[in-house]
Structures are given as structure tokens and as C-alpha cells.
Amino acid sequence: IVSGLLDRTVRIWDATTGTQIGNPLHGHNASIWSVAFSPDGTRIVSGSFDRTVKIWDATTGTQIGNSLHGHDDSVLSVAFSPDGTSIVSGSLDRTARIWDATNGTQFTNPLHDHDDSVLSIAFSPDEIRIVSGSDGRTVRTRDATTGTQIGDPHYNDDVWSDAFLPDTTSSRSALVHTRVRIWDILNVPTSNLSTLSFNVFSQYTF
């Protein structure tokens, strides 16, 4: 398990014993809001209130390459693509950005469609699309290559977490004080959900 903390560190934990693995990862200059493992487990990406995205070696704890600069405000959400070659980030600056996970360059111009902070972001399993949710009560789907929006945005409450089902045909969003939604499929009542993910069998965990 990887965690990002208010003390500006990234920490790795043994999921069986709960003990910390290695030393804390230092490098960010402000609280860390979002972290994620690469699909193969060899790297970690972190997004911070210092406006940067960093990539780490999950075994040694050393930073890989330079920090990714571009956001004009705190980075609130980060995710690897399923093949590990790309990273997507969402920010308080209302933009989403797509990065090359190898050299840190941006693939497209910043994605400016949201009218408030981008709180959550995820790649589809086939890497064709990106879904993002914002404090402006919208969920938007984009082409992962061009960054263009696909279809109309969905409107609800503040969106804190997004995840695609493994079949790639639908996405689920966690909304403040409302409910879990699988867009175009079904609505499942719940309360004050802040984060979620799917396993490979399309069963979900909160």
C-alpha cells in the first residue's frame, strides 16, 4: 500500500502486516494529496500541494527524473495509464494534464473543460479515454490521445472519486452527499462516499 501524508512524505506499507517498508520518501515541499502505484508495481506517482507531480522507484524510494511542473495550483489527483507509459493529473487550477511517464513531457495542452478543481481522474482500461470529476459537479470523459471531450458532461454533486469498470464501457463516480453512479447503467444508494476502485472482476470496493 502507498500513502501520501500531510507531513510531505510518501510511505509504503506491507499490505499483510501493516508495517512500513523502507524509509519515508522525501521530496515534496507541501502536503501530498494523491498517490498511485504503476500497474507493474515498480513505480509510484504522487501529486502535492507544492503544484508538482513526482515519480518514484517503489523499491529504492528514489525519485525518478525531475518533478513534473505545469500546474498552477495544488495537484489533487494522479493516475497511471494501464500500460504505465502515461500519467494523468488533476489540479486545483481546474485543469487536467497528460504526461509521458518516461520523460515527463506533456502529451497535450492542458485540458481546461472543468470550471472548478479537478478532484479525481482515471484512465479507461483500454487507455482510450480519461474520466475526470470536479468540484464543479461535473464528470467529463476525454480522448486520452487528443484531450478532446467525448459526449456531454454529467452533472451532479461534487465528484471526489472516479473509476472505470474493467470492461471499459462505463465509469463509476463518488459524489458528495449523494450516491454512487455507474453512468448509463445503474444507481446504487450509499452515503458520503469519498473514494472507490474496482477489481478485475468488476466488483467494487469502497
Image: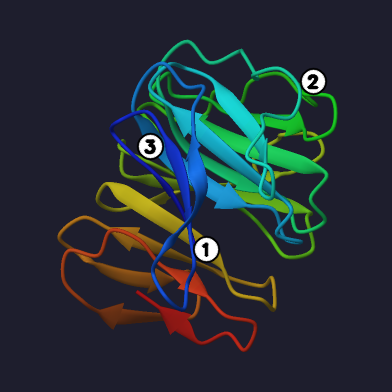
Name the residue beneath numbered marker 3.
Answer: 33
Disc 1 residue crowd, few under 14, some 14–19, many 20+, Cα 10 Å:
many
Name the residue beneath numbered marker 2.
Answer: 105
Depth check, mark 3 against mark 1: the one in front is: 3
**Disc nearer the start of the sequence (2/1):** 2
Name the residue beneath numbered marker 1.
Answer: 163
In the rendered image, is residue 56 in sight?
yes
Amino acid type, label 1: Ala
Spatial distance from mark 3 to mark 1, Cα to Cα?
A: 17 Å
Where is residue 139 shown, x and y percent of the image?
45, 49
Question: Residue 138 — which label?
Answer: none
Label 2's element? loop
Q: What residue is rendered at 68% in x and 60% in y?
A: 124
Q: How many marks?
A: 3
Amino acid type, label 2: Thr
Where is residue 162 shown, x and y percent of the image?
46, 57
